Amino acid sequence: MPEPLLSVRHLTKTYPARRGQKLIAVNDVSFSIDRGEAFGLVGESGCGKSTIARLIMGLEKADSGEICLDGENLLSLRETQRRPHRPRYQMVFQDAASSLNPRRRVRDLIRDPMVEHHILSGDALNARVDALLSMVGLHPDMAQRYPHEFSGGQKQRLCIARALSLNPELLVLDEPVSALDVSIQAQILNLLRDLQKQLHLTYLFIGHGLGAVRYVCDRIAVMYMGRIMESGDSETLFSSPMHPYTLALADASPSADIRLRGRARIALRGEMEDVPQTGCPLYHRCPAAEEACQTRSTALEEIAPGHWTACRRARLLREETNA
Amino acid sequence: MDPILSVRNLQVTFSGLGNQSIATSDISFDVFPGEVLALVGESGSGKSVTALSLLSLLTRQAKATGTVRYRGQDLLSLSEKQLDAIRGKQISMIFQDIMNSLNPVLTIGKQLTEPMICHNGLSQAEARTRAVSLLEQTGIRDAQGIMKKYPHMLSGGMRQRVMIAMALSCDPELLIADEPTTALDVTIQLQIMQLLSSLQKARHMALLLITHDLGLVAENADRVLVLYAGQCVECGDVDTILTHPLHPYTRSLLRAVPGIHDARDQRLYNIPGTVPESYGAMTGCRFHDRCPYKAHCRDYEKNAGLLPVTDTHLTRCAYLLGGDCDA
């Protein structure tokens, strides 16, 4: 088997909280993404998915763990050693408007990374900007404009063009469509799918809309309170979830399919709370929880080929549903 | 059955710096007792402006014309004082922005008892007893404790429960919910929508649900109005609109949402382009530039009103109504 392009191992990040306590934002998370694969991280706000993106990009410092790009642990490198690797992984943020400097023209915005990394110069540089704009569905003439002259969807296209300027292998997409209207979302999702095929890109796609993540990604991991609860093939993860949290998340996602109206749904009790980090973090909300879930650890277990779940009751629940 | 709220030809115009811009035009609908009517549309479609104009909650730069008939009176022609007697009592509202909808320096108890003291003349003690009961009805376990807290001490879901308790405190006939769950996570959204729906049914209260989410419409509404560029483009009962829509915008929108059980190899439908910027002055079809039937439609410059498909289903597209629906 070839080495995965990105491999995250035992990644942990904590922040100081009140009264000398620690907030564990990312808790011993491991996953890997093969070259050319689109991998999704889903979960509700505060689950740690964006922190993972920021750790990979080096925007935050991890407490422990490894982030390996092609086998090389980025976290063990000094900044000067890491810099040559930076063009290989680029990021697109949720808020396109605030990720574009309002006082610079589009041409400069897209050119900057290439100038910084001495990729191209002169006419070749301008030609490359034109090509990038066309690649994301914008007209090259727009290069003279300022960001405020673009709509929300177009701004996100600009961010994508800029992220692609250095020919990255990995794109980290942090909620790239969450701020956009439905009709514009579809445009950007289709663009991302096309670009991935065309340029053989590898994606880490972070989102909270299950439909959107599933549309782009081959595999998905579901996070809750800093941990991966379940991961698997995106085709089957939401149709046959093994973890009660995945099931609840899928059930809670509104569906415009009128035939599903009034369906039986699993509603989680209460809200995400800080709970002692022993046992299952979902314990006090879970409809399937039993006494032992409060104390027993919940390591990910491969319950079917490629399908991992961190619920100790998953096997049992599965047998019950099959019976 | 007579509607409790009847809106006719509602037009909202904003003026400033010598310019006038028309935000919504020609919006007409009825709300019947005990029903859930959804106004659905993307940002800028005019759904919130419509909702806010019903109770004259828009800024002074906005001018609403048309009629909003409620119990024999036109709400648009009432004075502030007359409106105060209706707002929060017969018609109340909950908002999307749960962070800023509660007063940060007053306790929940103080804020929750105020409408009942003002509108219903309850004593302090009576209002408190009722407030606790309302909080319990919204699924808050420690209602007594919450009464003493300040908004910043509550989570988003809890704040929205408090907002709902407050909106229901005077037993309104109509609740206007403007994107009530947009700021919440999906598992909390489900809790809040289930709560709203059960309270609405138990009280036989009408609910005007403003949302951008067709999923919430499908799951909660009886009837739906689809708004695009400040106009209603289609309305009818929710089953018809979501399974047999006749307007190209409604059709396109439904095909543009990725579902979690859809075939993944099927490409999402792209609605090309964006909403026209200054649509207020447009005479013909406002969706024409983005319409999949653009090449075939000849009458797009004519101002099509809402046309009946059936008794209860109206559409603004004359082209598809004229046949050729499967093209």
Image: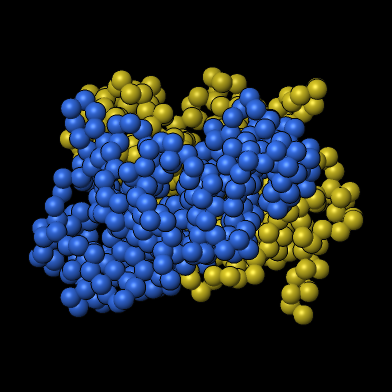
Name the residue rendered at 49%, 30% in the picture. Answer: A86
Residue B68, placed above or below residue B77: below
Q: Colour of chain B?
A: blue
> How many numbered callouts?
0
In the foreground, B100 or A88: B100
In the foreground, A292 or A133: A292
Name the residue rendered at 29%, 31% in the picture. Answer: B61
> Where is residue B76 shown, x and y percent of the image?
33, 45
Name the image colouring: by chain
In the foreground, A176 or B225: B225
State which quarter of the image contains the C terminus of chain B. bottom left
Name the residue rendered at 38%, 56% in the picture. Answer: B72
In the foreground, A223 or B134: B134
Name the residue rendered at 81%, 68% in the picture. Answer: A316
Asked whether residue A236 appears in the rendered view, the answer is: yes
Asked whether residue A39 appears in the rendered view, the answer is: no
Q: Label the yellow chain with its letter.
A: A
State which quarter of the image contains the N terminus of chain B. bottom left
> Where is residue B35 shown, x and y percent of the image?
49, 64
> Where is residue B64 shown, x and y percent of the image?
29, 43
